[in-house]
Image (cartoon, rainbow, N blue to C red):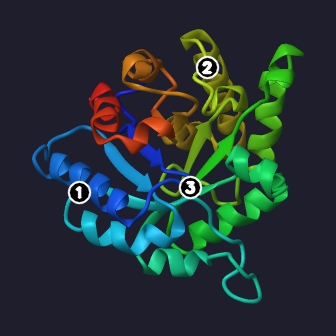
């Protein structure tokens, strides 16, 4: 982690939680943030869409930001079940996750789609968290770096900058499996991503853009991972559903 980049700790709640769970979790995080105003990290939580309104009200004034787990590329129209970036921004989302491997797999989203979603999210005034990552098959065949390079360049929106874009490296084989990339594996990919960003958006912006690690980050390994030169925080799944664990990961970034 570079001292020039402020760590970002993002919680992806996925399809978990009911109203009472969301309110309790958001309340616990809000209280911790209010009681620790000088913490050296940014925090965002991304609840399921039906819980966004409840969570944003619970977090109000705490400093914890809210994000969406997805954002459609269109501003409006006949897209049943989707949410426009303008609406998400309007109800309080500061961030939008796009291109998560579960969206790429379950909904067939390709790099072109992810790029369009990122561009629309940015245009609406949100920060796009763009997810990339290789499968176990791709890693074992020696294609980890090339796979991430291809996804990054195909998904990176026009006008991407450190202010409006975050990259999240999530090795697919480590998401929800308990497996985690070794520090050496994580740093290798993060460094390769930053090198590609230098070519795509210039050295100055690339040096400021945050690259998160996702894939079974937890309190026991967060400090070691976040200490790596090109790891600037985490996109946390399971551990974000327990306030003490999520907060412990955040403190590891301080």
Residue at 51 percent across and 62 percent down: it is 48
Q: Position of residue 207 (x, y in %)?
A: 51, 35
What distance separates the C-alpha of mark 3 from that of mark 2? 21 Å
What distance separates the C-alpha of mark 1 from that of mark 3? 19 Å
Q: Is residue 179 above or below residue 232?
A: above
Residue at 13 percent across and 43 percent down: it is 36
Crowd rating for badge 3 (residues with CA inside 10 Å; few <14, some 14–19, many 20+): few
Residue at 35 percent across and 40 percent down: it is 242
Q: Position of residue 243 (x, y in %)?
A: 30, 42
Residue tagged 1: 27
Which quadrant is home to the C terminus? top left
Mark 3 touching mark 2, by CB under 8 A? no
Residue tagged 2: 179
* Foreground label between 3 and 2: 3
Per the image, label 3 sits on a secondary structure element best described as loop
Q: Position of residue 90 (x, y in %)?
A: 45, 81
Q: Position of residue 145 (x, y in %)?
A: 78, 24
Q: Total label count? A: 3
Which badge, 1 or 3, comes first in the chain's sequence?
3
Depth check: give the residue in front, 133 or 27.
27
Q: Quadrant of residue 152?
A: top right
Residue tagged 3: 15
Q: Is residue 55 above or below residue 36?
A: below
Mark 2 touching mark 1, by CB under 8 A? no
Instruction: Tell me: 176 left or right of 48.
Output: right
Residue at 62 percent across and 76 percent down: it is 83
Crowd rating for badge 2 (residues with CA inside 10 Å; few <14, some 14–19, many 20+): few
Mark 1 touching mark 3, by CB under 8 A? no
Which quadrant is home to the N terminus? top left
């Amino acid at each position: 982690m570079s001292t020039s980049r402020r760590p970002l700790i993002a919680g992806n709640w996925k399809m978990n939680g009911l109203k009472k769970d969301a309110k309790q979790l958001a309340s616990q995080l809000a209280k911790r943030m209010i009681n620790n105003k000088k913490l050296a990290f940014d925090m965002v939580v991304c609840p399921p869409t039906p819980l966004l309104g409840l969570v944003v009200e619970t977090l109000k004034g705490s400093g914890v930001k809210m994000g969406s787990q997805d954002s459609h590329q269109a501003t409006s129209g006949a897209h049943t079940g989707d949410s426009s970036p303008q609406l998400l921004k309007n109800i309080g989302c500061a961030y939008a996750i796009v291109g998560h491997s579960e969206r790429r797999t379950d909904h067939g989203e390709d790099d072109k789609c992810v790029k369009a979603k990122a561009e629309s999210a940015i245009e609406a005034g949100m920060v796009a968290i763009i997810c990339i990552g290789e499968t176990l098959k791709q890693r074992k065949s020696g294609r980890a770096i090339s796979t991430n390079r291809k996804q990054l360049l195909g998904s990176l929106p026009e006008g991407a900058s450190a202010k409006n874009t975050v990259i999240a490296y999530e090795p697919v084989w480590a998401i929800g499996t308990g497996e985690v990339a070794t520090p050496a594996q994580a740093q290798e990919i993060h460094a390769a991503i930053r090198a590609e960003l230098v070519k795509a958006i210039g050295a100055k912006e690339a040096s400021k853009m945050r690259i998160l690690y996702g894939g079974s980050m937890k309190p026991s390994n967060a400090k070691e991972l976040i200490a790596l030169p090109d790891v600037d925080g985490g996109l946390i799944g399971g551990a974000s559903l327990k306030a003490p664990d999520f907060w412990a990961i955040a403190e590891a970034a301080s």
